[in-house]
Amino acid sequence: MDATTPAAFLPVERPAGRGTRPAPPDTDPKESMYVAPSLPSWLTWWQRPFPDANTLLLPGRQPALVDTGFVGHAEETAAWARAHAGNVDLVVNTHWHCDHVGGNALLQARGAAVAAGTPEAEAITRRDAGCCAAEYLDQPVAPYTVDLPLDDGQVLRLGDSDWEVVRTPGHTPGHLALWQPEERLLVVGDALSAYDVGWVNLALDGLDAAATALASLKRMADLVPRVVLPSHGPVPADPAAAFAAALRRAQRLVDDPGAAVWYGARRILAFALMIRDGILAEEIEPYLHARTWLTDAARLLDLTPEALADELVTTMLRSGAVVLRDGRLHAAADHTPVAAETLRVPYPRAWPGAGPR
């Protein structure tokens, strides 16, 4: 979010067609279309700005959608999938963060089943208060259930092709990738992008979370994919170079846990600003002081929450990752506006029970 995209990973434009990322309604296609190198014609890729994750659609006998974006754009996600594939039979989540599961509830209400990594599936079924880290991160998620828990090595029929589940914990404990061996396609979720790696939560997931994420990156790199499909940003033009850069970055986070904590804090705050159309400058510190993630980060950094909040805002303003406009702090990264009323969903502790479907 606060990194730049290396020239080697700049996207290539070409006319829209199957295998491209069709622009959603009211979007300028020239601004929104990025194409994976040699994507097969039987899949459709939609690169989306924050706060949504990129979306992969696999039409066919079992139409499937990999990740469903942010809750504030659930109707847009469902309309796009319906326009390109009709009904969606299966949703597969790479992990449970709000930008990946936001359309689950709506699509599930319209008949789709939801599949997710077993650790997260079990927690969702139990209705654990910590589900999706939604309350912890103050990131809304509409209530949903998981119909199909996924384990490492499991093979899924998505559309008309078979994909293997690859467990890739680190960014979250239940994070997974999807591997299509014939075309050597790898859906990597938030494990890496063309410009960075996923942040890790040392407070919730333990001080070894960064090492776990690094091991997952090494496992994925060993597959030697031809195409890497990330959850954010463009498809890397050179998968090997993308993995090499990600491995270096991940190793630095292992070597410097403090940097990993700071990295996560910056990402979480930027996302909060995106989904709220900014936060009033005089309200930002009270907002941060009330966040458990900030208190945990301050503890790991041996700072007071007040000192961390002040330094976080100051450094992000100085770097240009946050801008002050009309008395509000805004995230500078490209993002799609969110209607305030769509954020009014209960935290998981208040979700209804997960009964049989």
Image (tube, helix red, strand yellow):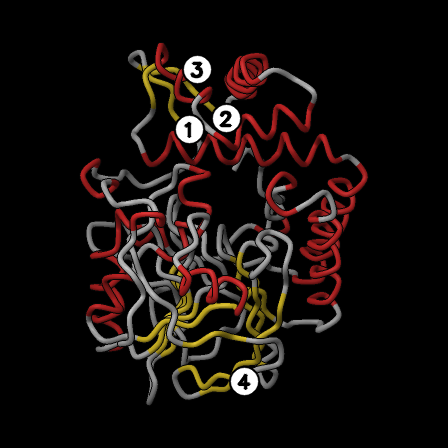
Which label's residue is closer to the chain start, 2 or 1?
2
Q: Can you give x and y, in whole percent of width and height, for residue 333 in the image?
A: 44, 34
Instruction: From the top left corner, tell me how far across and down residue 170 is, in percent.
Output: 64, 54
Q: Nearer the viewer, mark 1 or mark 4?
A: 4
* Callout 3 amino acid: Glu
Quadrant of res 76: bottom left
Provide the secondary structure element on which disc 2 rests. Answer: loop
Disc 4 designates what residue? 155
- 177 relative to 173, above or below: below
Among the two numbered marks 1 and 4 on one chain, the one whose residue lies closer to the N terminus:
4
CA distance for labels 3 and 2: 17 Å
Q: Residues within 10 Å of mark 2 (few under 14, many from 20)?
A: some
**Disc on the earlier residue, 3 or 2:** 3
Kind of residue indicated by mark 1: Ala
Element at badge 1?
strand
Residue at image position (52%, 38%) is 1
Disc nearer the start of the sequence (4/3): 4
Mark number, residue 321: 2
Q: Is residue 325 left or right of residue 116?
A: left
Q: Secondary structure beneath disc 3?
A: helix
Is residue 329 toward the left or the right of residue 293 in the image?
left
- Residue carrying label 1: 331
